Amino acid sequence: MTLVSGLRAAAQGVPFMPIAGVFGSDLARTNGWRTVRDPYGDTEVYAIPAVRPDVAVIHAAEVDALGNARVFGTPFWDHPLTRAARRVLVTAERLVPTGHLARQPELTLVPHFMVEAVAIVDHGAWPGSCHPLYGVDYPALQAWMDDSPGALARHLEAAPEREAHD
């Protein structure tokens, strides 16, 4: 939640986002976060500094030629990330006609004017999920965590997009 709070602060153009959920942990000390007094009550909250990434790369289910992107899974990271970043790059499972997105514009998570570049990457979220097209590949994630010699090469060899280009 602290990272999302930092992204939300940047997206809203404010220097920090107040949160209360880190009391009792070492996160605040480790990160040098400071507290501020709630101006409407008598409590202290942590002020999480704005996080403004230079580039955000998200993976969408659909994108049109203009760059309008739809994410059908959880938008809770992608939405503030794309609003906070200076530049947004989108990879997507499939290219759809602009008219398809225009029929339900409220489903567009990232509008074209925020997107700098788009690439169509079938199974680009693998071994993660891209709802509703495919779920998490847990055996592939387990194999990816293997640190033995050749593990990365074996992981890349198993990638689904490799099948599309062989």
Image: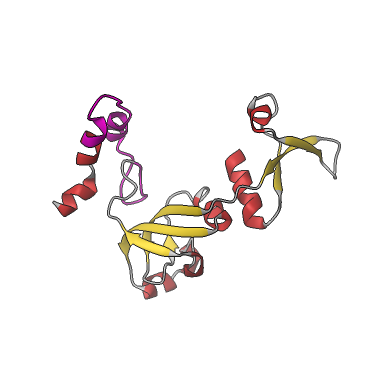
Looking at the picture, how far across and down is residue 30, in whole percent? 64, 28
Looking at the picture, how far across and down is residue 6, in whole percent? 63, 45
Which span is picked out in magenta?
A: 128-153
Q: Is residue 143 magenta?
A: yes
Give the image's coloring scheme.
secondary structure
Residue at 35% x, 42% y: name it: 128
Quadrant that contains the N terminus? top right
Residue at 70% x, 28% y: name it: 23
* Residue in front for this viewpoint, 27 or 63: 27
Quarter of the figure with residue 25: top right
Q: Is residue 26 above or below residue 68?
A: above
Q: Give the side of residue 21 with respect to residue 136, left or right.
A: right
* Residue in front for this viewpoint, 115 or 123: 115
Looking at the picture, how far across and down is residue 13, in whole percent? 68, 57
Residue 124 visible to an observer of this rendering: yes
Q: Give the side of residue 13 with respect to residue 120, left or right.
A: right
Residue at 66% x, 50% y: name it: 9
Quarter of the figure with residue 20: top right
Residue at 31% x, 41% y: name it: 127
Looking at the picture, how far across and down is residue 69, in whole percent? 43, 62
By secondary structure, the bulk of the magenta-drawn segment is best described as loop
* Residue in front for this viewpoint, 63 or 162: 162
